[in-house]
Image: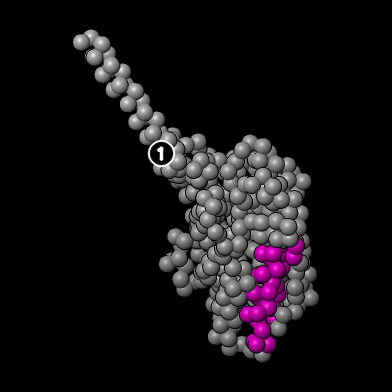
Amino acid sequence: MLNRIWRVVCFGTCAGLLLLFVGCSKADKGQSANKPNDSASAKGDQPQVTIGLAFETLQTEAWVAGFEALKAECEKRGFKVLEAVADGDAGRQLDQVRSFVTRGVQGIVLVPKDAKTSVPAIKAANEAGIAIVLFNRVADRRGVKFVGIQADNLRLTRETVDFMVEQARAQGKGKLKAMLVMGDLGDTNAIGRRDGFDEAIKGHEDLIEVVSRVPSEWNQEKAQAGVVNGLQANPDISFLFTSSDFLLPSIVSALKQAGKYHKVGEPGHVILGGFDGDATAWRMLEEGYLDATGVQDMYYEAEASIQALVDLMAGEDVPELIQDPGFVITQANKDQLKSRMWGANVGK
């Protein structure tokens, strides 16, 4: 009798262990360790996903806003973030990406220094099999793979300048002389904005004559010197577009120096437009000096960047380029669009 009881106990124990083993094996096969799972990560069932954020600079409010939006998006998904800023040094950025690889990140969001010098950093991620997304600025694709998240610079600039042209025609003051403040033409964003300006002006030669093109190279001092010189050579300039709101303080200083800084609707007002949507642009809209600016939707770009990484890590197909349509904010619609303009929410 005792032997029979012992055999039943042993059989039950073995059966239970077998069922436990089979159950664990099925669970292991049901999920891949390479695919991020937000709920599982939160419960600790899988190692936490780590994302490396490598920015070329945090010099402007736009980059700071993008950096913070990306970190917030990662936090929302339960991802760990490693941070790096290259301060304009392509060699340092390459070292930072290599460090991310060594530290075992699953994905990288990179703001490249420019289209060419960033290629080795992208290649380092590719060779390590790490998903990489380029935020707000893309690079040459020769020999490397990445997903680019970028504002539709050409279209958004064209729409902004189209609005400025409409304002010029509504004034009925005849032909206006115009100035374009350009960015660093080694940056694809600057090229798109220059080309968008030219497309918007084309066909309106009866109304707009471009007499000054200022190469700023994204530098405040160069921008101010160039605008001062342009206004001295053409004191009747009354239409000005800047490729970045980051340069507005320099432009305003030059306009004040020339006695040409007046509110919209006032005599002598220079029709003024920009691109980015930073806090300076918002303040100038509120105060009545800025006619319009093309706003990059940093919140959209941050969400799209992290979602693209998630999809890449899961082995899904992702378009090579995802464009942020942005929007044009003006004196007429600023109250309706304020909540979507990142510059109106800086520091909140």
In-image side of 174 versus 329 (left or right): right
- Tell me: residue 13, above or below residue 48: above
The quadrant in which residue 114 appears is: bottom right
Q: Residue 8: horizontal and vertical position, in percent?
A: 26, 19
Compare residues 132 and 156 and report the one nearer the observer: 132
Q: Which residue is mark 1?
A: 26
Q: Is residue 187 magenta?
A: yes
Assess disc 1: are there few (<14), some (14-19) or many (≥20) residues with their C-alpha within 10 Å of its C-alpha: few
Compare residues 157 and 221 and report the one nearer the observer: 157
Q: Visible in this render: residue 255?
A: no
Q: Is residue 272 magenta?
A: no
Secondary element type, mark 1: helix
The quadrant in which residue 256 appears is: bottom right
The quadrant in which residue 209 appears is: bottom right
In-image side of 142 versus 23 (left or right): right
Which image quarter holds the N terminus? top left
Look at the image and give the residue range highlighted in magenta.
Answer: 177-205
Q: Residue 316: horizontal and vertical position, in percent?
A: 53, 55
- Tell me: residue 222, above or below residue 86: below
Residue drawn where x is 55% and y is 40% of the image: 50
Residue drawn where x is 66% and y is 67% of the image: 243
Q: Residue 258: horizontal and vertical position, in percent?
A: 71, 70
Q: Label 1 amino acid?
A: Lys
Q: How many marks?
A: 1
